[in-house]
Amino acid sequence: MRTTLTLDDDIAARLQAESRKTGRPFKAIVNDYLRAGLAQRRAASKAEPFRVEPVRMGALLPGRSYDNIGALLEDAEGHEHR
């Protein structure tokens, strides 16, 4: 299929450099990169979603709260916890 494609200058320069380096035609380089990009996108869409399994941490000691993580770290690790 013949079509007109407008490339950004930096992309065109990289593709031309690849064509010169490999000695392959410009249109072959463009087609190869388009195929690779489409295949990578298809593979990424098939990836399993990341899941987090919650773990019960037990009850907090009286007077402590998860709202102030800095205070919890200081209680657990001391004043120099950073």
Image (cartoon, rainbow, N blue to C red):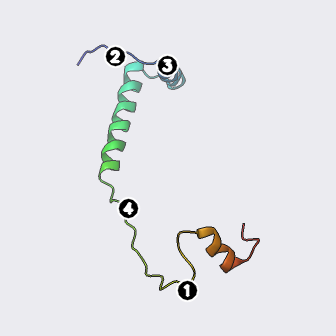
Q: Earlier in the sequence, mark 1 or mark 4?
A: 4
Q: Earlier in the sequence, mark 4 or mark 3?
A: 3
Q: What residue type is labelled 2?
A: Leu
Query: In x, y percent, where is residue 31?
Result: 35, 27
Q: Which amino acid does label 1 sit on?
A: Pro
Label 1 crowd bin: few (<14), some (14–19), many (20+), radius 10 Å: few
Measure how far apart labels 1 and 4 are at the Cα level: 34 Å
| Circle 2 SS class | loop
Residue tagged 1: 62
**Contact (CB < 8 A) between labels 1 and 4?**
no
Q: Earlier in the sequence, mark 1 or mark 3?
A: 3
Asked where in the image residue 63 lies, by quadrant, the reply is: bottom right
Q: Nearer the viewer, mark 4 or mark 2?
A: 4
Residue tagged 2: 5
Q: Which of marks 1 and 2 is nearer the N terminus?
A: 2
Query: In x, y percent, where is residue 73?
Result: 65, 73
Measure how far apart labels 1 and 3 are at the Cα level: 68 Å
